[in-house]
Image (cartoon, rainbow, N blue to C red):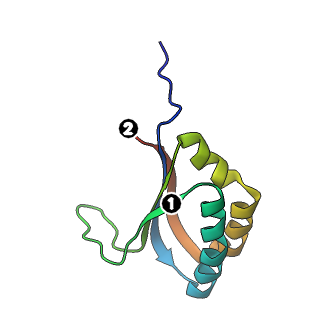
Amino acid sequence: MTKDTRGTKGYWVSVYRTISDPERLTAYDKLAGPAVRAGGGRLLSRSRRVVAHEAGNTQRVILIEFDSFEQAVAAYESEAYQQALVVLSNSVERDFRIIEGID
């Protein structure tokens, strides 16, 4: 039997390894914030303080919550967010994931 995942929250997790152009990151933030909110996302954390263990990274970490995994994927694929990514392009190196929460 396949589990019904409707209603299972979705999350964007983004860990920045390097930021080579802070001005472009700021411009991205100005576009990405409204795009995320329009897609139903809620910013849970924009880390200022990180304690990293093992091979952890102390750079910027972002955590955004959506009401469903599908909503998180759709927000990423939205035209507004894709425009934000164009601005960001090669100004950062990050590990970006969309993950399904536990119901």
Give coordinates of residue 78: x percent, y percent: 72, 55
Q: Residue at x 52, y 58 (%)?
A: 96
Q: Residue at x 49, y 17 (%)?
A: 2
Residue 53 drawn above or below residue 30: above
Give coordinates of residue 84: x percent, y percent: 69, 69
Instruction: Give the mark toward the camera: 2 or 1.
Output: 1
Q: Nearer the viewer, residue 55 or 38?
A: 38
As helix, strand or loop, the secondary structure at mark 2 comes to: loop
Residue 16 as seen in the image, left or right of residue 51: right
Question: In the picture, residue 52 is in which quadrant?
Answer: bottom left
Residue 37 as seen in the image, left or right of residue 42: right
Give coordinates of residue 41: x percent, y percent: 55, 57
Give the total number of marks visible in the rendering. Answer: 2
The C terminus lies in quadrant: top left
On residue 42, which mark appears? 1
Give coordinates of residue 66: x percent, y percent: 52, 50
